[in-house]
Amino acid sequence: MSSMGGPHVGFAWQTVVYRDFDVELDEPGRRSGAALEALKADLGIPDDAEGYGLVGEWAEELSRPLTAGLPELLARLSHPDTTVRRILAVVFAYAYAPAEEVAPALLAHSESDPDAPVRLGLLFALGLHCDHPEVRGHLRRRLQGAPADALGAALGLLLPPVAETDAEVIDEALETLTLCGGEAGEALAELAWCDPEWCGRPAAYGSVDAVDSWLTPTPGLRSRWLTRMLPGLWDGRLDAAAAPVLVEAADRLFQQDRDAFADHAPAVASLLGHPDPRVRRAAVETHRLPAHRAYTEALARILQDPDPGPGSGTGAASDSTSIASANAGSDADADVFERALGVLARRGDPRCIPPIQHRIRQGTVHAGLLRATADLADQLWPHLRARLGHDLPAAEVCSLLTGTSAWHGGAPAVPQVVTTLERLSRRIEATDSPEFDVLEAASAACTFLRKWGLSDAAALSTLRRLARTADLELGLAAIRTLMGLGESSDDEVVPLLLNVLARRDRPGRVAGRRGWRFDTNACAWLGELGPRALSASPVLCSLRDATTQAGELRVAAASALWEITGDTSGALPVLHGYATAAEGPAAARARDALRRIARTSRGASATKA
């Protein structure tokens, strides 16, 4: 607590930062910022007035009204402007003052103010003085009041710094907190804690989220509140917009203690069958609950339904409104199915196999889902091999091959991948400007063959042919794959890379789909081979020393020569010349090479020492 506004008012900055608002926040939203400005103007507080500035701009702004002193603040409880009274109630929630000086006015106005949000805020603020019998008695009586009053009283009783200890009162207050999703929540949504720009969601979300956030430090109370809240999504007490808050709360509680809070898992699992698509979509967005059997079983039941797939039907809607509603439901069902499928796939649950097999056959499986199913590869490879046996779109080929890159057991698919690569190469060779997807798919096929096909004669034959193809990008992909053979391939790989350099000036593309120059790639890969590429030194020397060549190529050749020979005398002048030049690819490459040379030199010196 910081002392401000005279000896009788202190600012509870810890509560602002650690419970209610972000330390980096300048204001919860323009509504709250404008209201606070109006209060400060009415109090005559200048913009440069003292504030508590150690924990963020909003906390500093919120503390400035306290400099007016307690009498001035209490006088504004009767201000004619509702906007001013609402933000004043929020300010009082962070104003420590002797109960005998502040409580009587707050008690009176929490009953008499005609505005429900103001009354709610003042009852909340009275929680600072709940250790005084008169205040506690007042809050307990207000639990029986109008919904907004009851919600404010419950918050005042349950939240720190003076938390309720009477079990009966706690139960009553927790039951009252369930009002946050209805009329009382609408009142709470008018205060700064639920500013629309701060919450970014409908009021039904913001008010429920605020209460959940306040209960987060007390998981036991949060769990008991959640138990009361979740049925509200079924009986109509809660808007579907509140579902994401409650599902996340259940997920996080389960993360904290799987035994103590396990009962929320079946409750959330039941929401997967809710008639509102927004609730179903929220119920499937979990991270920890899939570890609970009841929740996993509910996910598996979803997969027993037909796969809605992307963009599934619109039903028989007869007008634009019903069509939109039907589409929203279909989209949600597709999202729920997709999420359930992904969760079970990541868990290696075999019940996800049939729908994934179906998607493979239909050509709709994506790489991310395949990556998640590595543990189920044995059951899926036959379907993938069959699919690769067709003349597929390049994007699908890329998804299938990149998605299975971490799978085991890929060798039986080598014949299909070789045939696929042959098809792709014909598409590439038929044009001067191959499509990105086709090049990407060909690269993925080469990568697959590097892992699984280097002992296959047909694969090697295809790769050797493509290594000399007219398209340098495809050729380099094939060469890179052949490099996987190790030293035994040096006699063919080095001439192939020199062949790429010899063809660098021919008409056509000079860089690949991602911007890398073909000639600099060839130099870099020669450098990777080190002394094994010594026969390439004359060509690289010529490129390094030719001032008419592109800077990137000269730098790449200089760097490769150093890696091959270990001699820096020829490389350093070229590298320093470009490293100190204007920014650009050549300069960046030169600086990177110099850093590698420096690290190697230091390592050699340390070894000698």
Image: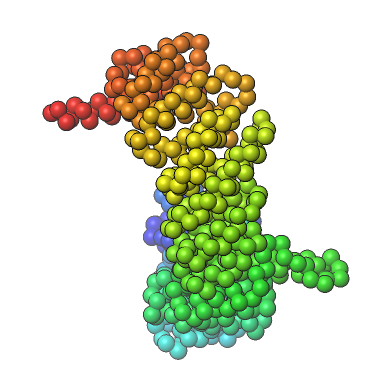
The residue furthest front is: 457
Q: Is residue 342 above or below residue 512?
A: below
**Quarter of the C terminus within the rendering:** top left
Viewer-closest of 190 and 527: 527
Q: Nearer the viewer, residue 345 or 64?
A: 345
**Would residue 508 be found to the left or right of residue 539 on screen?**
right
Q: Position of residue 187 (x, y in %)?
A: 64, 71
Instruction: Say which residue appears at 19% left-offset and 26% top-offset.
Output: 605
Q: Residue at x 48, y 56 (%)?
A: 412
Outermost residue on the right side: it is: 318
Q: Is residue 9 visible?
A: no
| Quadrant in the rendering for residue 257 | bottom left
**Figure colour scheme:** rainbow
| Residue 564 position within the rendered picture, expressed as x and y whole percent measured from the top left | 33, 24
Q: Is residue 521 left or right of residue 146?
A: left
Q: Residue at x 66, y 73 (%)?
A: 306
Taking depth in this image into account, of 335 and 342 the one nearest to the observer is: 342
